[in-house]
Image (spheres, rainbow, N blue to C red):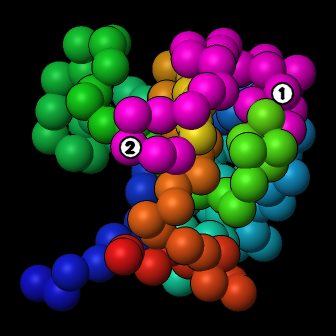
Amino acid sequence: MEQRITLVTLGVEDLTRAITFYSALGWRPHPSSVEGEVAFFDMGGAVVALWSREALAADSGVVDGGGWGGVTLAHNVGSPPEVDAILEAARSAGARLARGAAPTAWGGYSGVFVDPDGHPWEVAVNPGWPLDAQGHPRLG
């Protein structure tokens, strides 16, 4: 197996609400999305999908206990003001701020929002992972 991820599927309770939330952050569903069933977002080398949480659990062969699944997603940016702006946009779109933006022990700056379906997202500047022109992190 190659060392890469091609798809992350987020289980959601209400697909329309989830699409509305991510659209408020500037994301646009891909035309291959199936209205009322699944939304795909082209992430430039990977795909994020929004799909029924119940259907995702059944398809994955797991029991959904309704709690946090032990995964936090991250979005790295180039500056602290970008972190602040994204956290505010997420809050305005309906996210809960789990951790306000602040300097980190590892020399960066980050904060965390939780989307309406409980998926945590860290928004961070990491000086050890500079972003290239396409916004991809380069491990230092």
Secondary structure, mark 1, is helix
**Front position in the image: 94 or 36:** 94
Q: Residue 82 location in percent, x, y?
A: 80, 48
Cα–Cα gap, marks 2 and 1: 23 Å
Say if the magenta span includes residue 89.
Answer: yes
Q: Residue 69 location in percent, x, y?
A: 27, 27
Q: Residue 28 location in percent, x, y?
A: 82, 60
Q: Quadrant of residue 93?
A: top right
Amino acid on which the number 1 mark rests in the picture: Glu
53 relative to 45 in the view: left or right: left
Neighbor class of circle 2 (other Cα within 10 Å; few <14, some 14-19, many 20+) is few
Circle 2 residue: 106
Q: Residue 64 location in percent, x, y?
A: 25, 21
Neighbor class of circle 1 (other Cα within 10 Å; few <14, some 14-19, many 20+) is some
Residue 115 visible to an observer of this rendering: no
Q: Quadrant of residue 1?
A: bottom left
Q: Are marks 2 and 1 in contact (CB under 8 Å)?
A: no
**On-image quarter of the C terminus:** bottom left
Say if the magenta span includes residue 63.
Answer: no
Q: Is residue 80 above or below residue 90?
A: below
Circle 1 residue: 88
Residue at 31% across / 13% down in the picture?
67
Residue at 51% across / 56% down in the picture?
126
Q: Which residues are magenta?
A: 85-108
109 relative to 105 in the view: left or right: right
- Closer to the observer: label 2 or label 1? 2
Residue 76 visible to an observer of this rendering: yes
Residue at 52% across / 46% down in the picture?
108
**Front position in the image: 12 or 71:** 71
Q: Is residue 78 above or below residue 69?
A: below
